[in-house]
Amino acid sequence: MTATPIVIDCDPGIDDAIALLTAFVSTELDIRAITPVCGNQPLERTVRNALTVCELAGRCDIPVHPGCFRPLFREPIHGQFHGRGGLGNAELPEPTKRAERRSAVDFLIEALEAAATGSRLTICCLGPMTNLAVALRMKPAIAAGIERVVMMGGAYREPGNRSLTSEFNVLADPHAAGIVFSSGVPIVALGLDVTHRVMLQPAHVARFGDMSGPIAKTIFDLMAFWDRNDVRRYGSRGGPLHDPLVIAYLLAPQLFRCERARVFVEHESELCMGQTVADWFGKTGGEANVEIATEVDAAVLELILGRLARYDAHVRA
Ligand code: RIB
Ligand code: CA
């Protein structure tokens, strides 16, 4: 089976790092590049974290192209649950791997122009969608090179996580999200409606404490920090596996149920800034270009943990 060519646009971030590590050991995926963006952390830190996670996993073959320094219009906001450096208590060295000189936007434009006449690329957005929005604004024709965008973001029937109405990735750059949702490209949206149902609980984390090797230890450290310990909000201990669900969708889409809709993003209201508003029934006309994930099979958690267990040095000869 031919591996799916993808670009991972992200803001590492603990769950971004877990998503990257899941993708690195999934041979179904051909990771063409990583394009960090300002989000959970300022850009300098998300770039540094992407580089060090690549180095940890022996994936220095994957180019890292630095993206946008800040959102399109609004003031930057950063993540609250990722620890001071963005990777919780995971102690990773300063990377020796260097970022590419070409920016994420220039890379996306060149790669997607080439992909338009070849095998189109799947763009996995795990953070604010500033990079892709700028690339689409600079060269709208690159949409022809996009197989689909699979993004973690939005809250469609679920309340927000960073504000009453809005999910962090969309709230952090609502204008960028609006550009991408209205671009007409095919989108799969994995929002809080499904990510809040995939909770990484202490018992799952404990498994990685029994594994051997530096990567398994880092996975344990990342996961242990991710426990929100907010049973009232989530119904259990643990943390929602937001970004890894994007990788899981690529590996096993059959574990998800999606409903088609158009999606609009609020960017005027102070109270509802970043709210994703779904037109489920075609009331606004226009093409419904977004598959919103509304249900997820619990098996998705074992899929992700099973991939991550491949880093257990005990297992590899
Ligand atoms: O709301 C969850 C999203 O915000 C995830 O991508 C997490 O990494 C943060 O960026
Ligand atoms: Ca993220």
Image: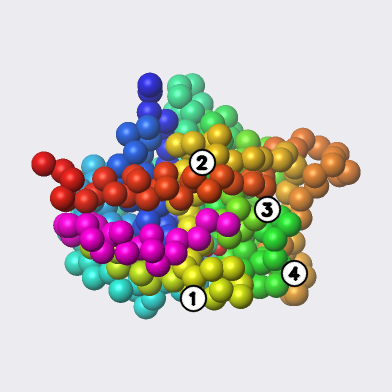
Callout 2 amino acid: Tyr
Residue positioned 37% across, 78% down in the render? 84
* Distance (Cα) linking label 2 and label 3: 22 Å
User: What is the total number of numbered labels drawn onto the structure image?
Assistant: 4
Q: Which residue is mark 4?
A: 272
Amino acid on which disc 4 is placed = Cys
- Residue position marked by numbered label 1 in the rendering: 229
Residue 15 lies, in percent from the top left, at 43, 60
Residue at the disc numbered 2: 249
Q: Are marks 2 and 3 in contact (CB under 8 Å)?
A: no
Q: Residues within 10 Å of mark 3 (few under 14, many from 20)?
A: many
Q: Is mark 2 within 8 Å of ligand 1?
A: no
Q: CA distance from mark 1 to mark 2?
A: 26 Å
Front label number (2 vs 3): 2
Tell me: 74 left or right of 211: right
Q: Nearer the viewer, residue 272 or 316?
A: 316
Q: Earlier in the sequence, mark 4 or mark 1?
A: 1
* Residue topped by disc 3: 178
Q: Quadrant of the C terminus?
A: top left
Contact, mark 4 vs mark 3 (Cβ under 8 Å): no
Mark 1 or 2, closer to the camera: 1
Instruction: Give coordinates of residue 99: x percent, y percent.
Output: 28, 54
Magenta span? 197-216
Alpha-carbon distance for marks 2 and 4? 28 Å
Question: Circle 1 sits in a helix, a strand or a loop, which is it?
Answer: loop
Q: Residue at x 74, y 69 (%)?
A: 272
Separation (CA) of disc 4 from disc 1: 27 Å
Residue 133 lies, with reference to residue 183, above or below; the image says below
The residue sitting at 38% across, 23% down in the picture is 2
